[in-house]
Amino acid sequence: MNQKGAMFHWIFFIVLLALAVFFMYNNKDVLNVGVKGEWSTDFLTENYLPAKKILLENNVLAKETATETFFELAGNGGFSKDTSSECGKYGGANLWNEKNNNCFPNVGDSFSLAMSKNLQLKSNKAFWNVMFNENFISGKGDTNVIIDGDNEYRFNDGFATQLFYKMEDYDTLFGRTVELLSKCDQAASADLLKNCLDTEKPTSWEYGDCQNPNYVEQDRKIKFCAISPYNIYLTNSASGQKELVIYNFALDFTPTEAISVGSLEVQADENEILISFNHDETAESYAIYYTDYLNLEGQTGNAQEMFNLIPDFLGYTVQIFGVTNWQESCSFTTSNQAYLCNGVITYKFNKVDLITKSGGYLFAITSLKEGSESEVKEMLTVS
Amino acid sequence: MFKKELERSDEVAMNKKGMMEDLFDFVFTVTALFFLLFFVILFFSGNINNSHDTSITNIAEFKITDTAINNLQRQAHIAEVDSSKIDSNIKGSNVWNGKIITSCYDYAIEPDCEQDPMGKGLGSCTWIGTDCYYVEPAVMT
């Protein structure tokens, strides 16, 4: 009985020892109380947060790439570096016009195209519907999957972030370009063209490159650089510094129509009349109208319409000469001959050849180009 | 007669001893169970507390990372984020006055922005209007 009782007491210690051994050597995962919400937090940490980080990286990359793309477009006159203007290039810059043909870029399309391509190069991911609208860049991507063990998290890859830029910069530049072309393409000579541009071009524009401005004109084509009309600064991702957006482009100031002849001068003596006017480098030929019907004095406009009003008994004469039919000389010896002297054309009439019933002569000069005739800008009267 | 009384007294003594042994066994059993349960409960309660702490820690870590990403998203909207520093910015996020600070842009009030107690801008956190910005030292001068 005592032994049996003693055994009973020992059993307690044996059980304690067994429990101690069990707890010490057991697989902890069996007895440990699991962490509350462990699966949920694991899923969030291993699947959701990486997805969210990818979207953040997309936004950061998209913003950097969009900035580079805007610089690229501005440097190429609104065209991506892989495309060029249909009007061609001058001095490495895309032409925004060729004579009367406008070649303004569709900047929205250029941006989408260039941005998609640049993003793919940087991220090895394809994005579509890439656009910039109201200071917002956005693009869609494929469905992305984050896999961690048995867990999968699917999300729409893409980006949408703010970038402070104004596409209206281009609209402003296009508007100023049209205005400048309309003002200066009628300049008859290279000097007059430069004078016109010096006066009329916006102060934020420079000739050639903004770093080294230099006026170079060839075939009435001129390269410009223009500072952002809205003073937009973008962060250069390479330097980390904010830089002013500068646009490079070229314009063609070839006149679309014949240019009116101005600066007419006359010298007359008893025997001859010398009519002088500035040479228009774009003209193919000139027409000199003269009549003794002095009532037309002071009129301007279409030459043929004006001179057709002259009564038949008076009539008028037209002398047309091409730009190759003159003599380059400052000595005007022969009558009924055109001379080119220091950029000025002089036509010599012999009074004997002119018939007048009114005691005077009225002269008007027009230029002819590609089948069009300029308007009469001024008339000369010789009595 | 005497023998019967003697036997009865023996029985009484035996019963008392038995009862004492039963009582001792009862007390021993209760004491043993008490200690047994004490250790078992101690073991499990320790585990439960650890589990609770781990949960809180996990959620706090998630919240910091989640908020840090949100902070950087906001910064990416209003300014620039250096793509090469996204991970270090997230890992370096700290809690300041109950708010998670990832960069200058996360200080909510001007004194915090100017003092930059978390050292996010290294002296370049600047309060402009209603927000805190990181302004490049070169631009400030």
Image: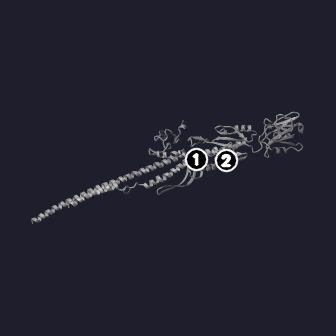
Does residue A323 sit above or below A151 in this rendering?
above
Would residue A55 be seen by someone viewing this image from the given angle?
yes
Looking at the picture, does residue A191 appear above or below residue A36? above
- The quarter of the image holding the C terminus of chain A is top right
Between the residue at mark 1 and the residue at mark 2, the CA separation in whole angstroms equals: 21 Å
Across and down, in percent, residue A237 comes to 56, 43
Q: Residues within 10 Å of mark 2 (few under 14, many from 20)?
A: some
Q: Give the quadrant of residue A267.
A: top right
State which quarter of the image contains the N terminus of chain A. bottom left
Marked residue chain, label 2: A
Q: Quadrant of residue A189?
A: top right
Q: Which mark is residue B108?
A: none
User: Which residue ends up furthest to the left in the rendered image?
Assistant: B2
Using the image, name the chain to which the residue with label 1 belongs: A
- Residue A264 visible in the displayed image: no
Residue A89, horizontal then vertical, whole percent: 69, 45
Q: Secondary structure at mark 2?
A: loop
Q: Is residue A202 left or right of residue A360?
A: left
Q: Disc 2 marks which residue?
A: A84
1 or 2: tag closer to the N-terminus: 1
Give the residue pinned by disc 1: A65
How far across and how far down the image is residue A290, in percent?
85, 40
Q: Are marks 1 and 2 in contact (CB under 8 Å)?
A: no
Identify the amino acid type marked 1: Thr
Dot 1: element: helix
In the drawing, does residue B105 fall left or right of residue A327? left
Task: Count numbered badges in the picture.
Answer: 2
Compare residues A216 and A321 and report the one nearer the observer.
Answer: A216
Q: Which amino acid, by three-letter code, is at mark 2?
A: Ser
Q: Position of residue A213 (x, y in %)?
A: 66, 37
